[in-house]
Image: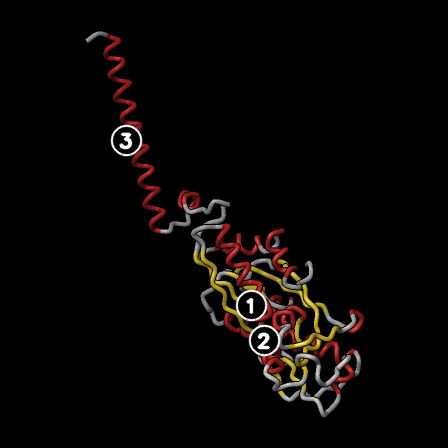
């Protein structure tokens, strides 16, 4: 065999060996995908089109976020094919208890910074994603002609509030105390949606809820504005949970909540900018 022939044969052999090595590497990467490996190699092959790692995420979220987060979750899943976001809604104090008890979840969004601050050992650094205000919810048409906070002191009215350990209950107590108004509620509820439900069903004449919650039931309740000088500002911090098995994907979702797309959804629902 001539020198040129031997050289060509060597080149063909080397090329075949290189091709075999590349195929073996790709096969290994494929195995990582099927196993859901979150290593650097696997993470690259399990990213969505936007670069966020694919995962099934569980997000614990305050009750007042129920409607907007269902919309936001669908938008996020559409933007990140292969990712599924499941929400668990409850009062922030209930969510905190779930975190402390080790409930499997990836991220947390509360309706106040106090609750989140109490979970520093369990969360990443929180980011405020939205703000909210209080209103007085009454039956449709405001049959009792309630005009302001002082009217809630009328003992002939059935007023329902959230329990003091619930963020909206604490905010309500704060604004009432500031105006030196004493209200004796007929019940104290575990979350803001329970307060709203009582008013919707006619079991209460009025209740203090978030502006965004009242906006979800405009066909059943009226919202009486509380002046800013008498109101309280609710802040909604979001954070990843340190026990998450999908840390990168959870961080990507929390970061997305501050993007223009997510902020528009929140503001369209009546939330204020953070």
Disc on res. 20:
3
Camera-side residue: 269 or 116? Answer: 269
Report the residue marked by disc 1: 66
The mark nearer the N terminus, 2 or 1, is 1
For residue 147, what is the image quadrant? bottom right
* Residue count near mark 2 (Cα–Cα under 10 Å), binned few <14, some 14–19, many ≥20: many
Evaluate if marks 1 and 3 touch, with contact meaning CB atoms under 8 Å apart. Answer: no
List x then y, in percent, for residue 107.
Answer: 52, 61
Q: Exactly how many numbered labels are in the figure?
A: 3
User: Between disc 2 and disc 3, whose residue precedes?
Assistant: 3
Residue 271 to residue 50: above or below? below
Element under disc 1: helix
- Where 247 falls versus 3 (above or below)? below
Task: Check contact, mark 2 vs mark 1: CB within 8 A.
Answer: yes
1 or 3: tag closer to the N-terminus: 3
| Circle number at residue 84 | none
Colouring style: secondary structure
Q: Secondary structure at mark 2?
A: helix
Mark yes or no: residue 177 visible. no
Evaluate whether residue 215 shows in this view. yes
Say which residue label 2 marks: 193
| Real-space Cα separation, disc 2 to disc 3, in angstroms | 61 Å
**Badge 3: few (under 14), some or many (20 or more) residues near its Cα, within 10 Å?**
few
Disc 2 and disc 1: Cα gap in Å? 9 Å
In the displayed structure image, the side of residue 249 where residue 195 appears, left or right = right
| Nearer the camera: disc 1 or disc 3 | 1
Residue in the image at 63% along x and 59% along y: 129
């Amino acid at each position: 065999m001539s020198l040129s022939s031997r050289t060509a044969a060597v080149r063909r052999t080397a090329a075949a060996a290189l091709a075999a090595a590349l195929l073996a590497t790709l096969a290994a990467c494929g195995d990582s995908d099927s196993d859901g490996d979150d290593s650097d190699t696997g993470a690259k092959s399990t990213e969505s089109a936007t670069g966020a790692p694919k995962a099934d995420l569980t997000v614990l979220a305050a009750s007042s976020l129920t409607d907007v987060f269902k919309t936001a979750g669908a938008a996020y899943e559409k933007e990140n094919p292969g990712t599924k976001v499941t929400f668990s809604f409850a009062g922030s104090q209930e969510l905190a208890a779930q975190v402390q008890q080790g409930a499997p979840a990836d991220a947390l969004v509360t309706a106040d910074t106090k609750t989140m601050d109490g979970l520093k050992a369990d969360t990443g650094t929180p980011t405020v994603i939205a703000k909210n205000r209080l209103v007085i919810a009454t039956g449709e048409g405001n049959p009792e002609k309630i005009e302001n906070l002082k009217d809630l002191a009328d003992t002939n009215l059935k007023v329902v509030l959230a329990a003091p350990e619930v963020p909206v209950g604490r905010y309500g107590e704060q604004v009432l105390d500031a105006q030196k108004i004493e209200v004796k509620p007929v019940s104290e509820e575990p979350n803001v949606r329970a307060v709203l439900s009582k008013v919707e069903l006619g079991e209460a004449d009025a209740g203090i809820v978030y502006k965004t919650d009242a906006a979800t039931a405009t066909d059943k309740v009226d919202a009486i504005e509380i002046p800013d000088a008498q109101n309280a500002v609710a802040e909604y911090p979001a954070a990843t949970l340190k026990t998450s098995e999908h840390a990168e994907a959870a961080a990507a979702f929390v970061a997305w909540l501050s993007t223009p797309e997510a902020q528009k959804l929140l503001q369209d629902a009546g939330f204020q900018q953070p």
